[in-house]
Image: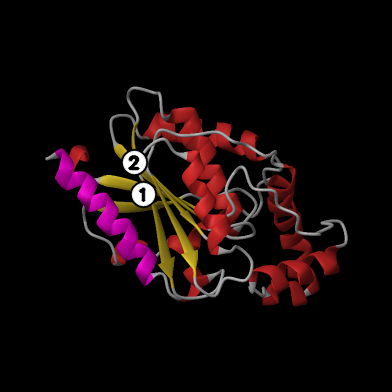
Amino acid sequence: MNNENVIYLLCFPFGGGGASVYSEWNNNLSSKIEAVPIQLPGREREIGEDPFTDLNEAADHYAKMIGDEYVNRRIAFFGHCFLGSTLAFEVIKRLENVPQIKIEHLFASAAFCPSSIREYGIDINQEDEFIKKVEQLTGMKNEAFNIPELKELLMPTFKADFQMDIEYPVNNGIINIPISAIYADNDIFVSKDEVEKWKSHTSKDYELYQVEGEHMYLLQKADRALQIVEQSLLNNLEGSE
């Protein structure tokens, strides 16, 4: 299929998560959309790599990688939670004016926006309290932290991801790319009002969508999010024919 007839959906994971959360997406998307899970270092197959601790440094890295690999291809971005969505936003900022890169859309899922003030009350150096607080906020419990050997292996990346979040400065930047923001109806961590603030970060079209579930709905039932993505991107393809 010609590159012009395919949109590559670059998917960034949430803090503490890996690319595998998106591994089945191509089984449920149109053949005109190819989901490309982006693996961050320090987890899953890249467990031995040092994780990023600065979100802008990570964005520089992925902007170069994507800029090199997706010349003259149509791409869109999906990010879950603050880390995934804001990392995607920062990559777009770096690439949107590159002539050979064709960016169609950003999907920000269950995420505080770049200009949000995030006060989690978390001290990442108090490891047990840190883990407990994240579980309370997100509703996600990682049983691996109950096994000392696995906890020791996973903690550096877990802490690094939240360091990127906590130290990211309030940013009122705007991209010239449409944004679709998604909130979960039972999310007690990131409210509808917070997700709605993504509207201030685009000069183009903006849509707000609701899905069923809690903050980590993506792990249990991603069907509605996939429908939103597919409908939006297929409309883009039809509009360009």
The region drawn magenta spans 223-240
Amino acid at the residue labelled 2: Ile
Query: Residue 166, how many percent across, how many down?
Result: 73, 48
Rendered image quadrant of residue 229: bottom left
| Labels 1 and 2 touching (C-beta < 8 A) | yes
Label 1 crowd (10 A; few <14 / some 14-19 / many >=20): many
Q: Main secondary structure of the magenta part?
A: helix
Relative side of 92 to 41, left or right: left
Per the rendering, the mark at residue 9 is 1
In reply to whether residue 238 is colored magenta, the answer given is: yes
For the residue marked with disc 1, what is the amino acid? Leu
Q: Residue at x 64, y 48 (%)?
A: 116
Q: Of helix, strand and loop, which one carries label 1?
A: strand
Query: Which is more toward the observer, 77 or 118?
Result: 118
- Residue 80 visible? The answer is no
- Residue at point 49%, 63% (across, down): 183
Q: Is residue 145 above or below residue 34?
A: below
Q: Nearer the viewer, residue 161 or 109?
A: 109
Residue 216 located left or right of residue 224:
right
Which image quarter: residue 132? bottom right
Circle 2 residue: 75
Quarter the C terminus occupies: top left
Does residue 97 lie above or below 39 as drawn?
above
Q: Which residue shows up at 49% across the image and 29% down it? A: 94
